[in-house]
Amino acid sequence: MTIYFQFFEAENLFLQRFVGKWKSNIYEDFILANANQETNKIRKIATDFRELIIPPDLNDLNILRNITKKIELQDYFNIQIVNDPIMTAVAQLYQITDKPQNVNYDICSTLQYAINFLNIDMTPHELEQRFKNLTGKFPNK
């Protein structure tokens, strides 16, 4: 699994795109590597899961809960863009059971919905281009 990411300061927007087969250890390393970064500027997060392959075994959900508790953000909006029934189920289970109270969280399958939810001024094409051209890569191999 590879995670591409970038913070767009003008919009207080953090974009991340997950590609490949889910690996909890990579996600945990990514969270820990960024936990010490200045996160108080992030107000909007959009995560693109459309290229992520989730194994049908949902045992990793408990691991995911423990990992996400390792980073604290202030009040923020978080949208997860999905196109797969398994990923939708995982995202919904997370939303029901573990969504922090300071998060306005949703799941969608279209970029237009993500744009509206985050209240950002761009077209779906522009958001797609940003996702495709993110400058950060983890792991950096």
Image (cartoon, grey):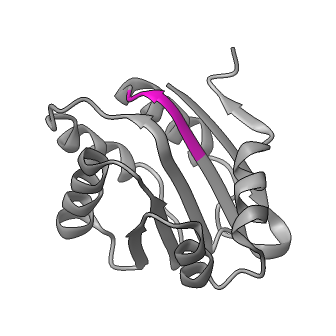
- Taking depth in this image into account, of 132 and 96 the one nearest to the observer is 132
Task: Provide residue 103's location: percent of width, then percent of height.
Answer: 42, 76
**Residue at (75% x, 63% y) in the render:** 125
Question: In the current view of this chain or complex, which residue is farthest to the right?
Answer: 10
Is residue 37 found inside the magenta-colored segment of the image?
no
Is residue 19 found inside the magenta-colored segment of the image?
yes
The image quadrant that residue 39 belongs to is bottom right
The image quadrant that residue 64 belongs to is top left
Left or right position of 79 against 99: right
Task: Provide residue 29's location: percent of width, then percent of height.
Answer: 50, 30
The image quadrant that residue 137 belongs to is top right
Question: In the current view of this chain or complex, which residue is farthest to the top?
Answer: 141
- Is residue 14 shown above or below 3? below
- Is residue 130 shown above or below 104? above
**Residue at (62% x, 75% y) in the render:** 43
Task: Provide residue 56's location: percent of width, then percent of height.
Answer: 18, 33
**Residue at (62% x, 23% y) in the render:** 139
Q: Main secondary structure of the magenta part?
A: strand
Total marks placed: 0
Left or right position of 71 against 44: left
Magenta span: 17-22
Q: Quadrant of the C terminus?
A: top right
- Taking depth in this image into account, of 11 and 38 the one nearest to the observer is 11
**Residue at (77% x, 82% y) in the render:** 121
- Taking depth in this image into account, of 124 and 7 the one nearest to the observer is 124
